[in-house]
Image (tube, coloured by chain):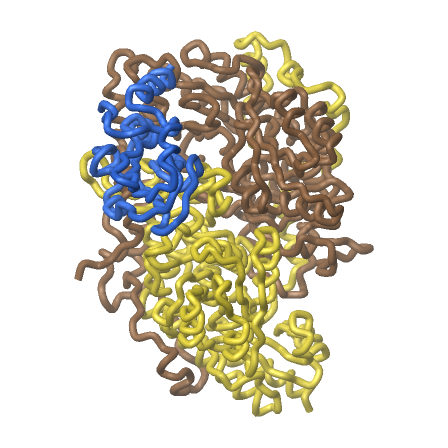
Chain colours: A brown, B blue, C yellow
Amino acid sequence: MELIFEKSKEGRIGVALPELDVPEQKDLIPEEYLRDELDLPELSEVDIIRHFTALSRRNFGVDNSFYPLGSCTMKYNPKINEDVAQLPNFTNLHPYNPLNKGALELMYELDQMLSEITGMAKFTLQPAAGAHGELTGLMIIKKYFEEKGEKRKIVIVPDSSHGTNPATASMANFNTITIKSDEKGMVDLEELKKNMTEEVAALMLTNPNTLGLFEENILEISKIVHEKGALVYCDGANMNAMLGITKPGDQGIDVLHLNLHKTFSTPHGCGGPGSGPVGVRTDLVKYLPLPTIEKENNNYKLNHKNDRSIGRIKAFYGNFNVMLKAYTYIRALGPIGLKAVAENAVLNANYMKEKLKKHFDLPFNSLCKHEFVLSDKGMPNSITTMDIAKRLIDKGFHPPTVYFPLIVHGAIMIEPTETESREMLDSFMEAMINIKQEAETNPDLLKNAPSTTPVTRLDAVKAARHPELMYTCQR
Amino acid sequence: MESPKDRKYSKEHEWVKLEGDVATCGITDFAQHQLTDIVFIELPEKGKQVEQAKQIAVVESVKSVSDIFAPVSGEIIEINEKLTDNPETVNKNPFDEGWMFKIKIKDKAELDKLLSAEDYEKFTKEEKH
Amino acid sequence: MAYIPNTDKDREDMLKDIGISSIKQLFKDIPTEILLKKKLKIPKPLSELELKQHLSNLSKKNSIIKQFIGAGSYNHFIPSVVNHIISRSEFYTAYTPYQPEMSQGILQAIYEYQTMICNLTGMDISNASMYDGASALAETCIMAANITRRNEILISKTIHPEYRETVKTYCHFHNINLTEIDFTDGITSIENVKSKITEKTAAVIIQNPNFFGYLENLKELGNIAHEKKALLVACITEPTSLGIIKSPGELGADIIAGEGQSFGNPLNFGGPYLGIIATKKGYMRHIPGRIVGLTTDTKENKGFILTLQAREQHIRRERAPSNICSNQALCALAATVYLATLGKQGLKNIAELSLQKSHYLLNKLKESGCQELSTKPFYNEFTIKVNNAKKINELLLKNKIACLELEKFYPELKDSLLICVTEMNSKKDMDKLVKIINQKVE
């Protein structure tokens, strides 16, 4: 398919613009500040629509079919969320427009609801994504120790952690120590005790962990960490398994981020925008980024004055339009609806795990929460996880998360979520079993997959060795 | 590919070929095989002082990143510029055209800490198991 | 139950199928002391009908005004095509394109986005976007520190105050020292830069057009930086300016950090917006965030793929130059559609409209006795001094018009207003604004 630049024709334009309604003045900007050339494509409206419509049909969303991406919680994105997000009194609201009571009220209530759901004292809604939230959380932890006059340079992460965890620790100028998980796939208490010293600022963990297992010893883990004066950071990516069932605040978690684009149904948008609010325990509230949203009588306001805050982590207040969708979702579900989310997410995952383990290697054969991990161990004819994933595309599904967590060889992480019907789960599993059979009888079908997509397997090595990152017209 | 006998090897899979007081260094066939297709190599700067067993270079494949450690101490006097545009040379020819950097060594005795070709082959066979 | 297809019967059958007696059993691995015994204390659910009403009522507690405020968030016309494209669910309900064969749509769109950004800014490489302009600027400080292996940054006071606060936060936790540069006559003081730059300076950061609206002398500032082997980072909060002003690349910038909200993304009370980072070829491996590259498939067909991933967190982990995982893909898509729709002629037109209108308004305000902060050239924002900014703004607000009082950001600029004019502001609105200010100014 041609690039938009290749469809450009001089003199075309995609929209009619108004005439100038004030007298024109000349030479408003001196010559040396002005550009000579402007290189943008020129197309008519119909060609622009056709171009991007064609592109959309080379894409695949949850609205197309099943998307069992472990750790991503690709649940259905309710359409009412999209409708209310288009209300003009929200979209046309400038961040410095003082007549913003509706927006502030929504943000304040969202803060309150997220605090209640997670058992934390207060949230900041400013972080734009999960990784941004992690950074905010670690900055808060760093500030906490700075004020205490303690020089703690270390953050501990389990070897199953998401890559953002150690990357975030580095960005906040911490050193990372990685500890091995035990044979059950959980945080190894002995390893943790061994590495927990007064130089450690925090343990960063995910609960349920990236194998989909609930850390049964979470209370003991928190105790070990707190005994040495350190804090527990929880990566809340897997909150879908805990809604209405248990609260991180009750598990000894001190700082936590949530992913509104995972647990709270806001769309992933091909990779953003998301939103990563951060919740903290009571004595850390003073470090939250500025501004915070406060309520006084029936008035909501932005509080910019707080010397002990870590400061700002972006301009304005966060991804308001994303918060709006999450707020609408929580108001649609209510307390029983949220609990049903966790119950159904966990049931769907266990249902799939019990059935698929008869055909695929399941390294940790225990009760899982909302997701579980298979591996490609024992696959015939040197078939790898990559081959299975690519063949699933031919079967009309988006593949699960692959090659994460790193502690499982050829990991296949499956998270069905609660918004899928039993028939969809059965249909996916049938495809997986079918692929296993193909692996035995006709492995080339997998090795050459996908074959039903606009392109076949792409050369990632070439793309990295000889990067071509923009189009240049061959004149 | 067999490990050439005219050089020494580190447990981190680097090789060293000494000529006078200049050590030409690279990574072994075993290493390049483990890394799979190399897409980029971050070499140290000329003139840099390096210490034996400390990290001095980085090799990237599509899905991973690996450290290269200095097999001996000394000063980097030359780097293989060809690898900038053709990192795949290391995959194709790790012991010859795929050399990475040359060090003017400080202490010949450091080479005694390294393995002979025979010992290195034994070591890699054990690593596989 | 909202959005959950399985019924009680489905659940019963599934439990039976896998030999588990009840839903409760699925949570037996959770210690009993942390299992919730009570319902969450959040409001009861609302039906879709009630939800629509509730949100509509909530939205009406906001008032939309005649916007003469810019300051990092710009009220521009968004062509209808933009919303139609980003509302296609193959785009907005999709995940990050880690499976490129089934995501060629967004990958190509991002490649086109990267190309347009490079062309507009005069750079060789753009990434697939960052969270917003402020955090993008903060990440370029870390980038500059890594490239030069120095840890001091000079940052002009004419940069958006919230951007400077964000940079301050990031740099504090990354052990990078910041020094602010003063301004005179509405732009960065060249003398002050010369006096503060040292051999330890990694970069000089300048916003153009700056927060007060004026055009900076990027070329000269770049020369001063390069003389000390420091980098020039140009920050752009209003990229429609690139429709008529010279690209920062041509003026000597090494890295661009910017805000792309003006390109097809609504005001949305501050987010989601679109962070831009672009740079020269030599710094490719230092740029954070996702990047899309061109390649071929097994049949030699052209295709697009996320590339240079060895820079990113999921591979480098603790050695990644940034922890950023996502980008603002849908916002970047909106920008791409916007730029394609306006095209070469349209972006220039929009910029011209903004330019002419803003200058018309300033002239009218000067005729009323207002004083401009500077006579330096400006694009669509400018700063004026009035007799009582607070009272004037109150009066304006009563008429549903708003400008931005600068005192809270710059205490030394008491009674100053920052005014922005775009193609969305009509002559009628501008004349009304002048009339109201006249009433106050006497």
Point out the residue furthest to the right here: A297
Residue A133: x and y, percent? 59, 44
Q: Is residue C260 left or right of residue C368?
A: left
Q: Can you say whether C13 is above or below A15 in the image?
A: above
Work out whether residue C392 or residue A186 is closer to the camera in this orientation and state it. Answer: A186
The image quadrant of residue B92 is: top left
Residue in the picture at 59% in, 48% down: A127
Residue A202: x and y, percent? 65, 36
Inspect this view and state whether residue A461 appears. yes
**Number of marks in the image?**
0
Residue A17: x and y, percent? 38, 70
Residue A193: x and y, percent? 67, 24
Q: Quadrant of the N terminus of chain C?
A: top right
Residue in the picture at 50% in, 36% down: A163
Q: Can you say whether A161 is above or below C160 in the image?
A: above
Work out whether residue C219 or residue C136 is closer to the camera in this orientation and state it. Answer: C219
Q: Quadrant of the C terminus of chain C?
A: bottom right
Residue in the picture at 33% in, 17% down: B122
Q: Is residue A162 left or right of residue A317?
A: left
Inspect this view and state whether residue A56 appears. no
